[in-house]
Image: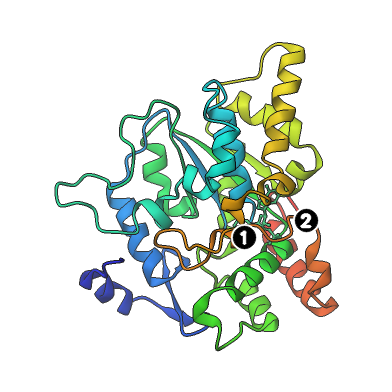
Amino acid sequence: MEIQDPNVNQITSSLPREKWCGHEFLYQYNGFWFTQTYFQSTQRVVENFKPLPTDVILASFPKTGTTWLKALLHSITNRSSKETTPSSLTFNHPQELIPSLETKLYVNEIQSNGTESGVIKDPKNTRVLGTHIPYQILVDILNSSDCKIVYVTRNPKDTLISLWHFVQKAKSVEQEPWELEIAVEQFCKGVLPFGPYYEHVLAYREQSMKRPEKVFFVSYEELKEDSKNCVKKIAEFLGCPFEGENEEEEEVEQIVKSCSFEILSEHEVNKSSDLPNGFPLPYSSFFRKGEVGDHLNYLDDEMIRKIDDITREKFHGSGFMY
Ligand code: A3P
């Protein structure tokens, strides 16, 4: 059960807040928006998390392909231990294999002796940890260690549609639906958990340009287009490239296949209506359609124009565009 820290309640009451959906409010901290729960766990991450130099941090804005990357990174980094993959993906949800800092490991109180509950201190294999926390907030932590960062992003309109479906499934909004028009407005204003999307993407993007040895930036669409090539590049970036021509091709193909939407979404664990520990939505909610361009089935011309305008304005000059 989550423990609300009274000090955090005091802090959030002094922060700018906006109604989000259902009865929930978001609080603005360092330019980004958080639910009260994730504000609290983000504070714990900032105060307590110390990455190991061998850690891999999977950073992303919500609904951009995090679950897919979790499966891929788990498979790439554990491929030498034959018993781990792909069978571990058959019986474990990617969200469990690669826990997230603020939505899992630091959701609850840090133990009184200061140990990080749930974080394996002395891992046998590379520790891969997920996060949606913006770079601007993690900058000191990420720079204090030689850890590597893989960042995944996705077309903003598909991201929004994916988030919109995801949120509809949450119990708290059953009574009060999150209207799509409102969701578009909020997306454009950046008022979404861990938003604004644009500033989130741009900061990690900038770091990947400045320090390509530290931050690897990949898009959902690139992954869809050429999964094998992306997997090879990620492995190289992580310092564990695939070697030996035929074997390499087979191994890469096997990883791509076992992490594909079609295969992953069919595993019982990923179809389960059970709620992961500390999370309000079932395991199955991380797998919906897994396609590029699904926004065309939901957004009208006016909504598309609004988002495209802001995308052009924000991404203009970054050398990166959707
Ligand atoms: P859709 O809602 O568009 O289907 P996240 O993991 O960041 O929460 O993102 C969830 C989105 O990624 C959902 O998109 C989900 O269906 C999709 N997804 C999950 N696993 C995937 C996979 N193996 N391949 C491609 N897309 C996947």
From this viewpoint, is residue 21 visible? no
Q: In the rendered structure, which amino acid carries the disc numbered 2?
A: Glu
Please report whichever mark, 2 or 1, sits nearer to the chain's N-terminal start: 1
In the picture, measured across the screen, residue 197 lies left or right of residue 288, that is: left
Residue 164, horizontal then vertical, whole percent: 65, 72
Picture quadrant where residue 156 is located: bottom right
Residue 135, horizontal then vertical, whole percent: 48, 50
Residue under label 1: 198
Q: Nearer the viewer, mark 2 or mark 1?
A: 2
The residue lying at 61 percent from left, 82 percent from top is: 178
* Numbered disc total: 2
Identify the mark at residue 291; answer none if there is no mark.
Answer: 2
Residue 237, horizontal then vertical, whole percent: 59, 27
In the picture, measured across the screen, residue 145 lies left or right of residue 199, that is: left
Q: In the rendered structure, which amino acid carries the disc numbered 1?
A: Tyr
Real-space Cα separation, disc 2 to disc 1, in angstroms: 21 Å
The reply to whether the residue tagged 2 has its Cβ within 8 angstroms of ligand 1 is: yes
Residue 205 vertical position relative to residue 248 in the rendered view, above or below:
below
The residue lying at 36 percent from left, 75 percent from top is: 15
Identify the mark at residue 257; answer none if there is no mark.
Answer: none
In the picture, measured across the screen, residue 113 lies left or right of residue 286, that is: left
The residue lying at 71 percent from left, 44 percent from top is: 263
Q: Secondary structure at mark 2?
A: loop
The residue lying at 58 percent from left, 35 percent from top is: 87
